[in-house]
């Protein structure tokens, strides 16, 4: 028998525009002793061919309707029901929104007992690719699919999951970079190597998220001021902490407690909604909670998980991020010489949403933090 294993060289997380490299190894593993034959023909195993391809599969729930009622391409329909065609989408729900050209790894591979051969599959992820995303109504998932076939046998598929990150708006940022053609030439200066697209993307991410420009917000009710909130910046990377401060020193309305929740808002494009008045889907992640009665100052430290998807937009869905605040307020108490804790409080709850931007971090940081490395295996 032939055992097939796949190993991604640099983890399972990549930025759109990066090159994905995967070692695919075919090994003729010895059969168990009780199944071995004395025939020499059993010592040689062969495969007719093997091919690899990256594809992005999109699945949706009942809230999403595709115009025309058919979400499958003619290629998917013609190949998904046959065992003799290399169809990476075979057996999966949804439809393919992106696929690379298949690359042939070999034809007519023969392996002796104990022999193995490895092939390097390399492919560049398109810049226009949607990100990996698991939402409530829409899901985008990436896989490297390795197809292989013995003579006169059905095709076997080995799938290697990927996570793809997209920097929303990076195309606009890259256009503002200095051009080498416009720079004056100087024969006495050392020639610098041109930065790779990956390095430019990481640099753009750093520039986007490193700027600190504090913003102040006065939270008020009709009866008066509740708190003054300061957020030190509006753009963050995955894995960062959202840090802010609360100033109750000039409040005229007592605040008993507050909570801040990191939330995503998933909005389906108007042309794909099942109902015209369909609302957005809200998902909550990390939360910060504090009892603040009698406090003059407090803080916010809210971590951003590594597994979430940064904000993005496609023809089908738009994902945005926000901070959801809830303030529990009371009525001002009459001033007395000696303060006693009240046995009951008349309270009201007010909510406020503050949009923020979340961008990807380096793929290495995500792979290391989530331990995403895997080694899929298949026996042919």
Image (tube, helix red, strand yellow):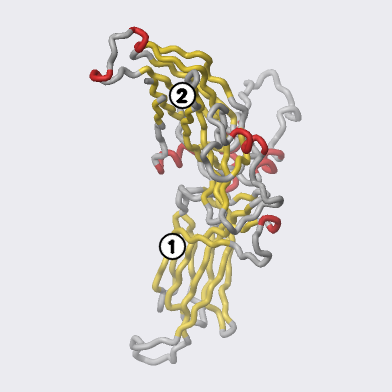
The C terminus, quarter of image: top left
- Give the vertical position of 323 relative to 183 (above or below): below
* Res 346 → quadrant: bottom left
Residue at 41 percent across and 74 percent down: it is 292
Q: Closer to us: mark 2 or mark 1?
A: 2
**What SS does tag 1 mark?**
strand
The circle on residue 51 is none
**Residue with the mark numbered 2:** 23
* Res 124 → quadrant: top right
The circle on residue 287 is 1
Please provide percent x and percent y for residue 249. Answer: 48, 76
Residue at 32 percent across and 9 percent down: it is 39
Mark 1 crowdedness (10 Å alpha carbons): few <14, some 14-19, many ≥20: some
Q: Residue furthest front?
A: 152
- Give the vertical position of 6 relative to 27 (above or below): below
Please provide percent x and percent y for residue 313. Answer: 64, 50
Depth check, front residue: 371 or 277 = 277
Please provide percent x and percent y for residue 215. Answer: 58, 62
Q: Residue furthest right?
A: 182
Does the image show residue 210? no
* Res 198 → quadrant: top right
Does the image show residue 142? yes
Mark toward the start of the polypeptide (2 vs 1): 2
**What SS does tag 2 mark?**
strand
Residue at 41 percent across and 13 percent down: it is 111
Give the mark count: 2
Distance between the Cα atoms at labels 2 and 1? 41 Å
């Amino acid at each position: 028998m032939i055992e097939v294993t796949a190993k991604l060289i640099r983890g399972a997380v990549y930025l759109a525009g990066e090159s994905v490299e995967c070692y695919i190894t075919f090994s003729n593993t010895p059969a168990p002793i009780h199944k071995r034959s004395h025939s020499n023909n059993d010592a040689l195993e062969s495969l007719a061919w093997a091919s690899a391809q990256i594809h992005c599969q999109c699945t949706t729930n009942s809230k999403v309707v595709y115009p025309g009622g058919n979400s499958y391409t003619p290629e998917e329909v013609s190949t998904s029901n046959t065992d003799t065609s290399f169809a990476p989408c075979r057996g999966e729900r949804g439809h393919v929104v992106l696929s690379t050209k298949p690359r042939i790894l070999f034809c007519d591979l023969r392996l002796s007992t104990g022999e193995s051969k490895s092939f390097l599959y390399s492919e560049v992820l398109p810049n226009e690719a949607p990100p990996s995303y698991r939402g409530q109504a829409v899901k985008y998932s990436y896989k490297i699919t390795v197809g292989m076939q013995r003579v006169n046998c059905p095709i076997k598929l080995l799938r290697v999951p990927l996570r793809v990150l997209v920097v929303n708006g990076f195309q606009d940022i890259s256009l503002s970079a200095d051009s080498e053609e416009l720079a004056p030439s100087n024969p006495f200066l050392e020639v610098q190597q041109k930065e790779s697209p990956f390095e430019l993307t990481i640099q753009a991410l750093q520039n986007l998220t490193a700027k600190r420009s504090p913003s102040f917000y006065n939270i008020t009710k009709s009866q008066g001021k509740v708190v003054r909130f300061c957020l030190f910046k509006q753009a963050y990377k995955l894995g960062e902490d959202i840090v802010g401060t609360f100033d109750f020193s000039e409040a005229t309305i007592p605040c008993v407690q507050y909570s801040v929740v990191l939330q995503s808002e998933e909005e389906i494009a108007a042309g794909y909604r099942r109902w015209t008045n369909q609302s957005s889907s809200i998902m909550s992640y990390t939360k910060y909670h504090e009892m603040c009665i009698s406090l003059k100052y407090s803080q916010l430290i809210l971590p951003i998980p590594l597994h979430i998807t940064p904000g993005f937009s496609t023809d089908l869905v738009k994902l945005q991020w926000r901070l959801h605040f809830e303030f529990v307020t009371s009525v001002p108490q009459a001033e007395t010489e000696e303060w006693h804790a009240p046995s009951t409080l008349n309270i009201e709850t007010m909510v406020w949403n503050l949009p923020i931007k979340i961008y990807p971090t380096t793929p290495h940081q995500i792979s290391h933090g989530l331990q995403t490395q895997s080694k899929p295996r298949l026996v042919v």
